[in-house]
Every structure is written in structure tokens, then in C-alpha cells.
Image (cartoon, grey):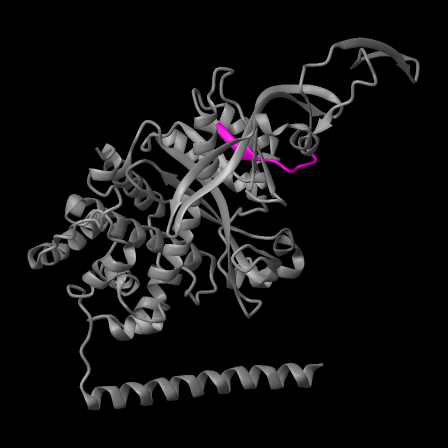
Amino acid sequence: MLPESRIQEDPYKIPKYDIKRTDIIDFVDELKGFHSEFQDCFSRQEPRDNFYQYMVGQLSQLERKSIEPIAIAVESAKVRAMQFFVSDVVWNNNKIMLKYRSMVNDDMGDPDGVLIFDESGFVKKGTESAGVAKQYCGSIGKVENCQVGVFTAYATRHGYCLLDSRLFVPEKWFSDEFALRRGKCKFQPGLSFKTKSQLAVEMLQKISQQKTILFKYVVADSIYGNSPKFINAVEDIPQVTYLVSLPADTLCWVRKPVMLQKQYRYKGELRSKQVLKTPEQKPISFETIANNTTNYFWYRRKVSEGTKGPIEYEFTKKRVVLSKNGSPEKEVWILIRRTLGTEPIYSYFICNASASCRLKMLVWLSGIRWAIEQCFEEAKTEIGMDHYEVRKFPGWVHHMTTSMLAHFFLWHIKLRLGKKAPAITLSQLRILIRAILPMRYFDCDELISLVAWIQEKNYRAYLLHRKKKMLLLNIT
């Protein structure tokens, strides 16, 4: 007799797809209903219309999703009005984000939700865009002229999306030399330099205080893991567990060392400090722990199911005491992950979970960061999050807001379809949505006039830039 595993249905059969014409027609009401929730976030009807039209363009099949192509392609949209709307019109952004997070919680909220913090770079050619500078750009893996945004994502068993964003503005932008540029970019009054970890703390505290999103875990990379302010901010939230990356040279003790109080004199004043009872008991690095762990304590685990099959690593965990300035600080779990093969690559994480924490939970948290990477990839590929050409600070904030909302709307539709299309992707959804989007139709004469207008506009811009350049050359 054949074993059951040989006669049961294929567990990896092709998912069912049962979408009908009526489902797609219903998308119109979904999109209009989604936008109606934000009506009171704008003072007049014109910006409400532009808000809708801009997102229609982001959801469309346009190759380039900057303001001009969107305004040309979307029904009733106008280029100048949309440019003014994105860069200069005042939005009630706090109200928009509060409503948006409430929607996210309705669709994806879960008591075991995870907040994920990471940054993403946007390559820029010029020097006038808010916060642009030569800095590390993660999207291309090297230092380049770019803008960098710090983002918060939310992931649960129901789905994932971006929750908030902040533009990272390098410190030099707040010098006197950049005062004119700050004015041109419409920097908010009182805006000051903040590190990426400080921006993350700002977003974390806001989300926590609003209490619109359910979450139990916080995950971040070493930029935030190395920040005491970020770690303290997480620890200030009751019953929240964090897992953050740290570098290989981070020091710790496998057993908490015994400390002694030592007195000494400094400029005649009697002082005291804590010192190791046994000076030779120095802390060791995470890398040393990894190298000294025998194969018996490494466990092979599947992190996720990739497009080409399962993604697996080997893991080990150990309870350690972190070292701070040569003294013991706090007791945490260290999770070490290594790739498979003869020359493994190691990654290191710490977690403040209880001593009874199982390896399974730590492995799951170590792999959940893929969700924010997926958000970036989908938002850039499908929504045009990196297609913007705005220079002003408010314009960057507004574009990122609509990008997050548009990405979430696709997820909303995916969740609504449920078992009708369990494996449908956001890219496939966008193909379906094009049937209901209010896009313009052009006849031959209109297209000829459109190209003529674009040529004239581009030539006028060229003459303006040429005039400025010639004046600059004459001055120097």
C-alpha cells in the first residue's frame, strides 16, 4: 500500500482564480469610497479632486508616474493645478495619517502585529531637492547623490504596508550656507537636524500614543539597534518585544561578571566606580560566540517561501549580558543566523524577550523584515514611489503619503477578493484596476497638439536654465 503522502492531493497545487466582471466593476465604488474618507482633510473641492486624480495616476499603467505624465493622462486633471497641489497646497497630513492607520487596523490589525523600521534611498541628479546630498543609498548599495527617507512598516498574518515616513535631512542642510535652499524648499519653521534613529523614535512614539494600530513586536536594523534612544523608546512601551540587528564586534558576556565597588581620588575628591572582580574576564564579541559554537547547536530553519522555493538559514541563540563601556548592561537573547554553505555569512540580532523565549519566535522575527523590503519594491515598481520630481519638503511628504495610501489600497482589494484570488499579486491587481480608472482618450489631433505643447514647454525651460547658467558664468 502506498503511503498517504503519495496519494493525497498535491499540497502545492495551483491556487484557484475566480474573479468575475462584476468584481472589477465594484473596484470603482471601492476607490471612491476610499477617497471619500479623506474629504475633510482638505479645505476645498479642487485639492480633493487632485488628491483623487494623483492617486489614479499612481495606480495606472503609466510608465513614468511623476506629476506631468499623470496630469496629462488622467481625465479632468491639469498639470499646473496638480503641481501646485502636491508642492504648495496645505494638507491636514496628521488627520490623513490617523484615518489611514485606522483603515490599516481594520484590514490588517492583529495583536501580534510587527512594526518594522528601515530607510530607503531615492537617487537624484540635482542639488536643489530638499535634503539631497552625497550619502549612502541602500537601493543601489553605494554612496550617491540622493534623498533618504526613514519608514515604518506594519506586518501581520493578514498583510503588510507602510505606516509612516520621514525625510532624513543631512546636518549640513541646517547651516547658514543652505539657508537660501531651505527657503526655496519650504522647510517647516523650527525644523532641526535629527538622526535616522531619532526620526524612527518620533514615528514609534506617535504610533504608540495614537493607539490606532495593534502591535506587539518591533524590528529594525543596526542603525536603530545601536541607538540607546531607540531601544529605550521601545522599552518604554509596555509588553512590546524588540529584535534588532547589531554588528559582529558588539561585546558581551555569556555569564554576568561579578563587579566590585572601587574607590579612588580625583583632584583630592573621593570617588567610586564599578570594576570587574576578575579583570581578565573581559567581554567577547558576537563573532567570537558564533565561531566557538559547535554544529550541534546550529538549527536549520525555513524563514519564508520564496518565488523559487524555501529560503533557509541556520540559527543558534544564547542568553548574554551586553557590555557598555566595559561594564555589564542588560541581559538579552542573542540570535545568530548564518547562510548555508562552506563560507557562511553571519548576521547578529538581540532580543529583549523573556528567558523562556523559544527559537521559533526569534527565527520568525529575524525574517519579518522582508515585509518592509517588499513594501519598498512594490511601491516603487507598481506605484511610482521613486518617480517623483518635486523639490520642496512638503512635496516629498505629500508624495510619500499618496504612495503609501495607493499601495495599501491595492492590499485592501487583495484582502477583499480573499478566496476568489488567494495568490493574486499587486502587479496583477493593477492590471485589473486599469479597466475602471478614469483615464483620458486622445484622438490624433489631440496627440499632435499635446506633443507640440510639451516641446514648447521643454524649450522654454531650456532657455530659462541657459540664461541662469550664462549669468552665473559672467559673474564668476
> Is residue 432 found left or right of 72 in the rendered image?
left
Q: Residue furthest front?
A: 1
Q: Is residue 298 visible?
A: yes
**Where residue 341 sits in the image (x, y, percent)?**
57, 44
**Which image quadrant: the C terminus?**
bottom right
Q: Nearer the viewer, residue 269 or 1?
A: 1
Q: In this view, does 394 lie above or below 231?
A: below
In the image, residue 183 lies in the stretch drawn in magenta: no
Q: Can residue 274 be seen in this view?
A: no
Query: Where are the magenta residues, as a range?
Result: 242-249
Q: Nearer the viewer, residue 208 or 319?
A: 319
**Which image quadrant: the N terminus?**
top left
In this rendering, the count of numbered labels is 0
**Where residue 453 sits in the image (x, y, percent)?**
32, 86
At x 69% / y 82%, what residue is drawn? Answer: 475
Q: In this view, does 103 lie above or below 264?
A: below
Dividing the picture into quarters, in which one does residue 127 lie? bottom right
**Where residue 326 sits in the image (x, y, percent)?**
76, 23
> Is residue 180 found left or right of 362 in the rendered image?
right
Q: Which residue lies furthest to the left in this view?
A: 22
Q: Which of 188 and 363 is in front in this view?
A: 363
In the image, residue 248 lies in the stretch drawn in magenta: yes
**Where residue 144 sits in the image (x, y, percent)?**
60, 63
> Is residue 96 found left or right of 415 in the rendered image?
right
